[in-house]
Image (spheres, rainbow, N blue to C red):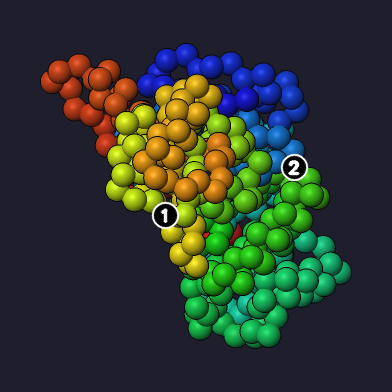
Amino acid sequence: MVQIDSGGAATRPSPGARNADDGAVIVAEGLTRRFGPRLAVDGLNLTVGRGEVLGVLGPNGAGKTTTIRMLAGLIDITAGRARVAGIEVGDEGSAQRLRSQIGLLPEEPGLYPDLSAVATMEFFARLYGVPKPDRADRIEELLRRLGLWDRRDNTAGTFSKGMRQRLALARALIHQPPVLFLDEPTANLDPEAAADVRRILGELRQAGHTIVINTHQLDEAERLCDRIAILNTRLIATGAPAELRASAETPGVTIELDAVTADVLAAAGTLAAAPITAPITAPDATVATLTVRLADMRRETPALVAAIVAAGGRIQRVSPGEASLEETYLRLIADQHVSHDAAVPAGFAVPAGGAVPNQGAAPTGGKP
């Protein structure tokens, strides 16, 4: 179910890949955005299903925020097309209806510093057409869930970064949109508040909301997301976190020993297909963990165990290793750079990966 684009080559078919016929809530077809000569997003094809949480990973300047802005109708699409909640993005006659279906947490909260939390929520509830009888209860519920009720009468200008982030998330949810675009939703939050946000996102997913999350935090993506899309101007790979990890080459073997000596490292190094991960010693100093990558794990594991034992290693446990999401991500990004550089003719400059300034209309939910 993993789809990988290796430098413009045909992607591997994905038996479970979603397409427009699957009733997807978000569909992007050849989505492209240029800022003058600079290519920010290149031919993005992507679908997101109802109740699915998609995490978008990529380096700075990869086009993650630009993609969200295009899908939210905030900036024009240079080429391609997109539909969100059945609405064609870019259709001027449907712009207001599109906004009503989307909740957006942008990079910058864009709050009015002189408005209190309650006044902020009331203002945007009116803008989004939340019925007056529902407003007070909905505002209180969201501010309580995000830990802001006790500060409801304080102005946003007096809030910390984390509190402003929570208020911006509450604002994005005030009209109960079926689709959420969240740019770094737990940025600036302490661990307790971040856990609360993750819990709320889980509840929203269970309720059938479709959520797209831009994040640099791979552990958060792994915990929150059903699927992950790795983007670097072009879509590099998509798949469930476990599928992406399993797609990594040269699987490893994890070996727990009493101790890792120089002789053990030398013995393991004779079979390793890649540099050996530095041994990790448990806090009680009775177990050391060694990860060794092998070209053929099934055939070479017995030889590896025999070599370590012959070198004096006292093995406690052997288990198949798996690439971390971070290792998989870094490999895919590195592979794209190698393939891209090889494809550029001599004398042509390599684009800077779509690194563009934050241009375009102010984000929905920011200052109107």
Q: Identify residue for label 2.
A: 51
Q: Identify residue for label 1.
A: 259
Classify residue 331 by image quadrant. top left
Sort mark 2 into few (<14), some (14-19) or many (20+) by Cα contacts within 10 Å.
many
Image position of 259 (left or right of 17):
left
- Measure the alpha-carbon separation of dots 1 and 2: 47 Å
Q: Which of pointers 1 and 2 lies earlier in the amino acid sequence? A: 2
Where is residue 296 shown, x and y percent of the image? Answer: 46, 23
**Circle 1: residue type:** Ala
Residue 178's tag is: none
Front one among 66 and 135: 66
Where is residue 71 shown, x and y percent of the image? Answer: 56, 39
Quadrant, the N terminus: top right
Quadrant, the C terminus: bottom right
- Residue ranking furthest to the left: 347
> Disc 1 or disc 2, which is closer to the eye?
1
**Circle 2: residue type:** Gly
